[in-house]
Amino acid sequence: MVDPTNIIAIDDVTRITSLRVEVLVVAADALRQLFERYLRSDDELSDLSVALEESVTTQQELFTETIDDQDVDAPVVRFVNLLISQAVNDRASDIHIEPGEHQLTVRYRIDGVLHEMQRADRGIQDGVISRLKIMSQIDIAECRRPHDGRLSIHHDGRGTV
C-alpha cells in the first residue's frame, strides 16, 4: 500500500478476508501498474466469454478463410483480440490456450512462469481455435493433426506467421 499508516484500510482488508495482513510500502505508480495488470480486461473477457457461451448454444459462429473478411465486432474476434492485447500489456512471451474437458484455460508465460489468466466454457473452444488458425494462416479444416506455429503481432494489429 502507498500509505502504511492507513489503519482503517488495513482493518477493512483484515475483516473482509479474515486473513492476517502484512503491510508493504509501494510507490503509487507501481501500485497503479499492478492494478492495471491484474484488473484490466478480466471483466470484459469474462463478459465476452459468457456472451460466447450463449451464442454457441443458439447458433454456430461462421468463419471465413481470411482474416480480412472477419467481423471485428463478433464476440469470438473480440475475445481473441482481448486475449492478445492483454498478453502484450502483461509482457507475456507466450499464450497457452488449453482445451479441457469442461472449460478452456488461457495461460500467459510472464517472466518464464505460466500464469492462469482466463477460463471459459468449453463451448467457445472451436471458435477461438478457428480464429487463431485464421490469424496464423493455418488451414482451419485440418483438425486431425497438431499444428505448430507462431503468430507475430504487428503495430497495426494484423497477425502473421
Image: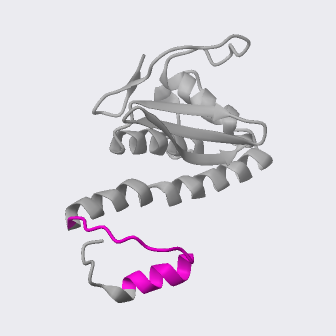
Residue at coordinates 45% horizontally, 35% vertically from top-left?
113
Residue at coordinates 36% horizontally, 39% vertically from top-left?
88
Front-lying residue, 68 or 112: 112
On screen, residue 63 versus residue 69, left or right, reads: right
Residue 126 quadrant: top right
On screen, residue 75 versus residue 4, left or right, reads: right
On screen, residue 4 versus residue 61, left or right, reads: left
- The magenta span reads 9-27
Q: Is residue 21 magenta?
A: yes
Q: Quadrant of the N terminus?
A: bottom left
Q: Where in the figure is residue 6, as x and y percent of width and height?
A: 30, 85
Q: Where in the figure is residue 53, as x and y percent of width and height?
A: 71, 50
Badge count: 0
Q: Quadrant of the C terminus?
A: top left
Q: Where in the figure is residue 134, as x and y percent of width and height?
A: 54, 23
Q: How is the image coloured?
A: one colour
Q: Farthest residue toward the bottom?
A: 8
On screen, residue 142 versus residue 80, left or right, reads: right
Residue 62 appearing in the image: no
Answer above or below: position of 30 versus 136: below
Answer above or below: position of 97 versus 58: above
Residue at coordinates 46% horizontally, 85% vertically from top-left?
12
Front-lying residue, 134 or 144: 144
